[in-house]
Amino acid sequence: MATDRITIFDTTLRDGEQAPGFSLNTGQKIRLARQLEALGVDVMEVGFPVASDDDARAVKLIAGEIRGTVLAALGRCNPTDIELVGELLQSAARPRVHTFIATSDLHLEQKLRLTREECLAAVRCSVTQARKYTDDIEFSAEDATRSDMDFLCQVVDTAIAAGATTINLPDTVGYCVPSEIARFYKTVMARIADADSVVFSAHCHDDLGLAVANSLAAVLAGVRQVECTINGIGERAGNASLEEIVMAMRVRHDLLPYSTGIDTTQLFRSSRLLSELTGEPVQANKAIVGRNAFAHEAGIHQHGMIQDRRTYEIMRPEDVGVESTLVLGKHSGRHAVRRRCEQLGYELCPGELDRVYRAVIVLAERGKPASNDDLAGIVERG
């Protein structure tokens, strides 16, 4: 089975930064942009410049510094936004203008107060205007998955005819389930005459906890760009998690025969930098980059890990830039205690091991897993 290349579109600096509590200043955005370039993202969405002067300044500065990655900035389908985005990206080596408008009747009627005809006109004018700045144009149909299919296809046809090269159809409110999102993309792509001339993109939100599953379902349906964020941050419950999507393709390559340009050894570093900059910790049980993602406390698990890591780890922790850990807690067994003691240079006879093990359990029952210093102190007290 052939391996297709999936474009990783990172929107941590735009959609991710819009989440409450995750605002970054210009200097912090530049630091994160450098790390995202080291991570190997294909496209980096660096801001929504019309939102604030700080956003506009960050877009301009990042455009002048990052050279290897496609840089996108977002603007609504109106002349003022498109002009601002185009001007700010002038110094970018690989600029992309990303423009959007809602296409569901709910959004058109209740939010935008636009008719369908006015929506189509805005799409046509904005994509045409964006082409004055770059040949790389992405169009997004906000709330696409709740839009009328006939009208959505008309919008997509209009965007492609005007010069869009990437078509993003977001599940803006995280409403879909995987089987539904796969059917949705297959239907759209089958009905668009020039579907082969553009890249279709998925942008899934996590309101039902299905953003990653929906993104992978979209890829299986033919999508070749996935929009995601570090740690899955973003509006409300967040976006699809970049690290989970990338590692799912790597670990389950038998079912997901796709490749990306991501240097997975930079995943943990990218996650930790984001946490440092925002002051928002990653939940301990977060897949791939959480504190406990490669931590093992249960004695049975620890014994298996000592014999062969594959018993309880489906990926090598060093492949994402971390090390696995045998936590000496109240569920640990003697095998893990002996292994940790050996790593610290202590060879224990059976009687000594039993004493140390019991002391570790007593400490753990007080709510404190035994650190290396704790363990050394227990051994040396005799």
Image (spheres, helix red, strand yellow):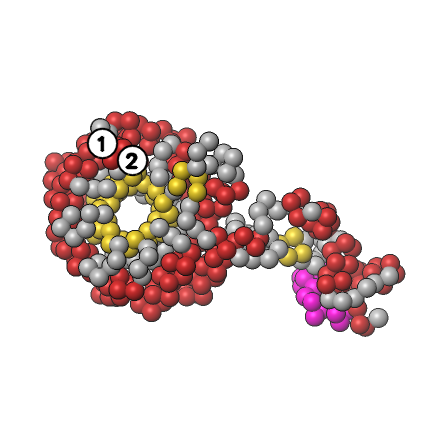
Give the vertical position of 127 relative to 151 (above or below).
below
User: Considering the numbered disc 1 on the image, is that residue within a helix, a strand or a loop?
Assistant: loop
Label 2 environment density (alpha carbons within 10 Å; few <14, some 14–19, many ≥20):
some
x then y, percent, for residue 320: 52, 53
The answer to whether 303 appears left or right of 208 in the picture is right
Q: Which disc is residue 194 wearing? A: 1
Label 1 environment density (alpha carbons within 10 Å; few <14, some 14–19, many ≥20):
few
Residue depicted at x 32% and y 55%: 69
Tell which of 170 and 126 is nearer to you. 126
x then y, percent, for residue 80: 13, 55
Q: Main secondary structure of the magenta part?
A: helix
x then y, percent, for residue 183: 36, 28
Residue depicted at x 67% and y 62%: 369
Q: Amino acid at mark 1?
A: Asp
Tell which of 285 and 236 is nearer to you. 285
Residue depicted at x 70% and y 59%: 328
Q: Earlier in the sequence, mark 1 or mark 2?
A: 2
Residue depicted at x 76% and y 62%: 342
The answer to whether 201 appears left or right of 351 in the picture is left
x then y, percent, for residue 377: 75, 71
The answer to whether 132 appears left or right of 254 in the picture is left
Q: Which disc is residue 52 wearing? A: none
Judge depth for marks 1 and 2 and give the one in front: 1
Q: Which quarter shows the C terminus?
A: bottom right
Q: Which disc is residue 146 wearing? A: 2
Q: Which stretch did the figure color magenta?
A: 361-378
Q: CA distance from mark 1 to mark 2?
A: 23 Å
- Is residue 208 visible to us here? no
User: Considering the numbered disc 2 on the image, is that residue within a helix, a strand or a loop?
Assistant: helix
Q: Is residue 16 magenta?
A: no
Question: Which corner quadrant of the image does residue 140 belong to?
Answer: top left
- Is residue 31 visible to us here? yes
